Image (tube, rainbow, N blue to C red):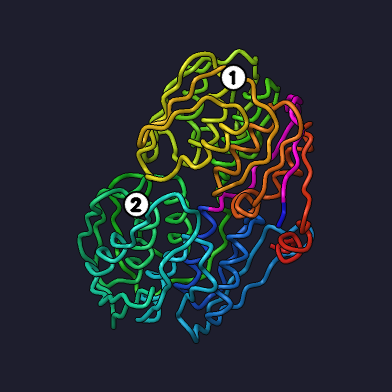
Amino acid sequence: MDKFVIRGGNPLLGTVRVSGAKNAALPAMAAALLTEEPVILENVPQVRDIETTRKLLSSMGAEVELGYGRAQHRTTICCRNLARPEASYELVKTMRASTLVLGSLVARCGRARVSLPGGCAIGARPIDLHIKGLERLGAHITQEHGYVEANASRLRGAEVVFDKITVTGTEDVLMAATLADGETIMQNCAREPEVADLADLLNKMGANIEGAGTSTIRVKGVSKLNGARHRICPDRIEAGTFILAAALTGGDLNVSGCEPHHLDALLHKLTEVGVKTAHNGDSVRVLGSGDLKASDVVTEEYPGFPTDMQAQYMALATQAEGTSIITENIFENRFMHALELVRMGANIKMEGRRAIVRGKTPLSAAAVLASDLRASASLVLAALVADGETIIDRVYHIDRGYEHIEEKLRGVGAQIRRIGEMLPKKVAAPLVRA
């Protein structure tokens, strides 16, 4: 099992480029199930969840062609023959986005059998919002033995009101609605950039979607979708992670290839903390002074402060002068990284959905355990400023969502290396063509 070994103390200097967004690429790959024609996706990140989805689509009968060389971040998917519209547990047990194929499959094939989602152990991810939405479109759905089965001769447009905001639920119902008979009006939708990115792809495929990126989406169903070429939007969470790393280490870092307006909540918070940033076109420059001030954070749905940045912000808060209160409103079990940060010397007290972080406390190297994707990132950030050599175990979590993060960090001055079952054997080899 791979580990990271990180020696702290180096500021991050130079330029690091952001990859495509995993959370946009996954629904885009699911959208390819809606058509017989090829869908060409560009800027696809080389991460484990993408490889898992590639295997999943292949198991259904899809042809998935991965690019080589300069086109290594391109993936072509042709779902002409879908012989087995099923997502088995063995294939999706490590990935919570498995439910994204449910709506596409029932819309295209009239039936679907999908394992309940896995992924990080950060809290419940109820699929009931997906089910209610698809049932409103006329699907008959049952659950047994850990699987969801959906059937429909033809979906029909309807009004769908989500009980709570759900990103994957919005995406799932949106994809199904594109092939439904009539108009679908979706209310209380997720407004994340990844939802708008999916709608952009679907419209290129011939769908008729208006309002993506707002709380109300209107979809006029069509009888058939076509192939398309689409570039995946930049990963705002990866960009935010590098931005916080620069702020934490007192570096001077240019984070390029991102969408600065997707980072508004984070950049506003950094202004309160005392970090100077400037953005120009597709890049954000971070000037870390090392003089950080405590500031509270409450995670919210987009455009609020993202839950996927909460763990990384907690690492920053350990080095800020004063007390920061971090409130997690999205997932109920997303403070598991806090105990590992305490092992490194942080002063953190947890009270339900709140974490009280008292800084500024010196961090020291320790052997720590990554519990989920973003927790892994927070431990990497903490290790960058810790005294000594930190060993982070179970970094397969971070490989699910960050493309070669150790190589990118090394390129801007971090002392980080991977040991154990080396990356080329387990991740890079099957993904180098993606």
Disc 2 vs disc 1: Cβ atoms closer than 8 Å? no
Image position of 78 with respect to 70: above or below: below
Q: Quadrant of residue 427?
A: bottom right
The amino acid marked with disc number 1 is Thr
Q: Quadrant of residue 106?
A: bottom left
Question: Does the magenta run of residues contain 14?
Answer: yes
Q: Secondary structure at mark 2?
A: loop
Q: In whole angstroms, how far apart are the C-alphas of marks 2 and 1?
A: 37 Å
| Residue extending farthest bottom | 83
N-terminal of the pair, mark 2 or mark 1, is 2
Nearer to me, 214 or 315:
315
Which stretch is magenta? 3-22
Residue drawn at x 43%, y 25% is 356
Give the numbered dot on residue 166.
2
Q: Quadrant of residue 235?
A: top right
Nearer to me, 162 or 76:
162
Residue 117, percent from left and from top = 44, 64
Residue 295, percent from left and from top = 45, 19
The amino acid marked with disc number 2 is Thr
Q: Which residue is mark 1?
A: 361
Image position of 89 with respect to 304: above or below: below
Label 1: how many Cα within 10 Å (few below 14, some 14–19, many 20+): some
